[in-house]
Amino acid sequence: MSRRYQRHEIAPGKTGNMTPLIDVVMQLILFLMLASAAVRPNQIQLDLPESSSSVKSPEKNILTVTYAVRDGKPDITLEAKPVETLEALGPALQSAGRGSEKPIVNVRIEKTVPYQDVIRVMDVVRDAGFPKFSLLTLLPTRAAR
């Protein structure tokens, strides 16, 4: 007596060939490993915010720090006066901030500055005794014209 098998059944004693499936899975794993190595996980695309409002902060005791990169070198200013290095910014902030009330510190960082330098500037401002400060926004491109 022979038994008829339906299309989806495999006859006893016969097995499916797993080699092509294993080859496809190994190629997929290799592709994903190589593709993930090409991605740079330590870099973050940072788009600085733009402000369309023309409201300015009140004119009271305010210090403004500007950090830009010019010709590959940092250009640091405190109240429009140049500061030689980032290490000199801390003492300059401390001497400018002495007085009856602690000033507000605004930090303006240009768009071309690497993100790691932004963090360094923020650390210097915090270490100088100003744990709360403001990051100034850029003017929108249509208003800057």
Image (cartoon, grey):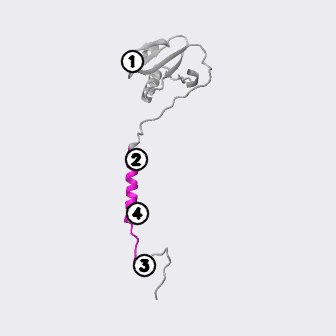
Q: Is residue 9 above or below residue 85?
A: below
Callout in the foreground (3, 4): 4
Q: Which residue is mark 1?
A: 85
Residue that sits furthest to the bottom in the current view: 1
Residue positioned 49% across, 75% down in the render: 7
Q: Which residue is mark 3?
A: 12
Q: Residues within 10 Å of mark 2 (few under 14, many from 20)?
A: few
Q: Are marks 4 and 2 in contact (CB under 8 Å)?
A: no
How far apart are labels 4 and 1 at the CA level? Answer: 60 Å
- Which callout, 4 or 1, points at the residue further toward the start of the chain? 4
Does the magenta portion include 35? yes
Identity, as a three-letter code, of the amino acid under mark 2: Ala
Q: Which residue is mark 2?
A: 35
- Which callout, 1 or 2, points at the residue further toward the start of the chain? 2
Q: Is residue 40 left or right of residue 8?
A: left
Identity, as a three-letter code, of the amino acid under mark 3: Pro
- As helix, strand or loop, the secondary structure at mark 2 comes to helix
How far apart are labels 3 and 4 at the CA level? Answer: 21 Å
Q: Residues within 10 Å of mark 4 (few under 14, many from 20)?
A: few
Identity, as a three-letter code, of the amino acid under mark 1: Thr
How far apart are labels 2 and 3 at the CA level? Answer: 42 Å
* Stretch in magenta: 12-37
Picture coordinates of residue 22 (x, y %)?
38, 62
Callout in the foreground (1, 2): 2
Q: Quadrant of residue 141?
A: top right
- Which callout, 2 or 3, points at the residue further toward the start of the chain? 3
- As helix, strand or loop, the secondary structure at mark 3 comes to loop
